[in-house]
Image: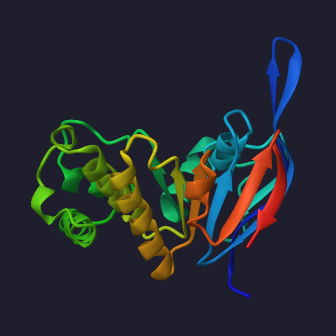
Amino acid sequence: MKKEILKLSSVSKIYNLGGQKIKAVDNVDLTIHQGEFISIVGKSGSGKSTLMHLMGLLDTPSKGKIYIEGKEASTLKEAELAKLRNEYIGFVFQQFNLLARTTSVDNVALPLTYSKVPVNKRKQIAIDLLTKLGMIDRLYNHSNELSGGQRQRVAIARALANDPSIVFADEPTGNLDSKTGKEVLDIFKDLHKQGKTIVLVTHDIGIAKVAKRVITIKDGKIISDKN
């Protein structure tokens, strides 16, 4: 059995809205091992985005425990969570979340500044990742000069900058046409072949099927987990 990267034990997230308690995530148990390619699929409002935020340490559970690389993260303060995220987790979002008037290289190098990587090394890591993702001709373009597909390639390179243990992709093809979306999914397939652990969050079962393991969520509960 490969190394355990992430574990959720009886995790719930409860929101108090107007005096009413809403269980966005309801008593979820989930373990992810190194090198897995997983998709989490569910309709809008199913709880999949809340689950991803919990798994990615962007939010803390109301109940239960979360472990990343064996470290319990459920009760940590924000500064400690930020450190763990930077060390172990990469994110790719539907909206790209790039700095608009910043070059591709500088966008990718940004997470490395928090890791105290020397400036020259940061730049080289960014150039190498962008080159591998077919962006050698766009290294010094600002992100507002790039197409949607090119921006997502920069975002993927940025997610990989710190060589994370796990990469979360939240609706990564949501703002792309079908051809460009397929190219982006092919990048994730290649990353998985290279040994990366990937969790793809989507509402589209067709996209979910690119993963080796498909987890379906409904009303905050996992109703199916298939390899």
Task: Locate residue 94, reporting x and y percent.
Answer: 45, 42
Q: In this view, does 150 lie to the left or right of 114?
A: left
Q: Is residue 33 left or right of residue 23?
A: left
Q: Is residue 217 visible?
A: yes
- Residue at 59% over, 67% down: 211
35 or 11, which is in the foreground?
35
Q: Residue at x 26, y 72 (%)?
A: 132
Left or right position of 221 against 3: right
| Whole-percent x, y for residue 226 in the image | 77, 68
Q: Can residue 115 be seen in this view?
A: no
Q: Position of residue 63 (x, y in %)?
A: 86, 44
Tell me what residue is drawn at x 21 percent, y 52 percent: 104
Q: Nearer the viewer, residue 16 or 177?
A: 177
For the residue pair 86 and 91, the one nearer the viewer reads as 91
Above/below status of 38 relative to 93: below
Q: Where is residue 1 in the image (x, y as percent from the top left)?
A: 74, 88
> Total number of numbered labels?
0
